Amino acid sequence: MDVVTFGRALGELTVDDIRSIARDLLAASVSPADQVAVTRSVLVIEQALRRTNRRPNAATAALTAATVVQQVAQRAHLSLPDKDVTRVARAAAQLARGLVVEDDPLAARAVRCLGTGWHRLP
């Protein structure tokens, strides 16, 4: 999946989808090993972004992804801040950053790690 397709899919979420994804994301990072894997993935993506000079693109993608999740919640008249919306928006931002450099083999592996919990995405 590329970053544009990911953004479109985020826009199709419902509040129920956000709640389900938030539960899945939480379940995917229960153990300390899971948390270490996520941290490593974020660092690998950051290194790839720096190496390829794509940090500005990644910042734009991350902001857009988080904003789309928040807009879905606002359209549903959900009061923000909301813990599930925050969890999904932050995770979407991190995943979007990785999708910017998914053509890098190490970053692609990191994106797969960060993609855990997103199987409900439309």
Image (spheres, grey):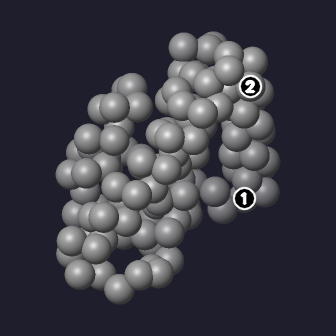
Residue 105 coordinates in the image, percent (x, y):
63, 13
| The label number, if any, that marks residue 85 in the structure image | none
Q: Residue at x 54, y 14 (%)?
A: 103
Q: Amino acid at mark 1?
A: Ser
Q: Amino acid at mark 2?
A: Arg
- Vertical side of 28 occupied by 84: above or below: below
Does the image show residue 48?
no
Does the image show residue 58?
yes
Residue 114 position by quadrant: top right
Image quarter where the N terminus lies is top left
Q: Residue at x 74, y 25 (%)?
A: 50
Q: Residue at x 34, y 31 (%)?
A: 4
- Vertical side of 52 occupied by 117: above or below: below
> Dot 1: few (<14), some (14–19), or many (≥20) neighbours within 10 Å?
few
**86 and 116: which one is in front?**
86
- Vertical side of 113 occupied by 27: above or below: below
**71 and 117: which one is in front?**
71
Q: What residue would you read off at disc 1?
A: 31
- Vertical side of 121 occupied by 23: above or below: below
Image quarter where the C terminus lies is top left
**48 and 21: which one is in front?**
48
Residue 91 coordinates in the image, percent (x, y):
53, 53
Q: Residue at x 50, y 41 (%)?
A: 60
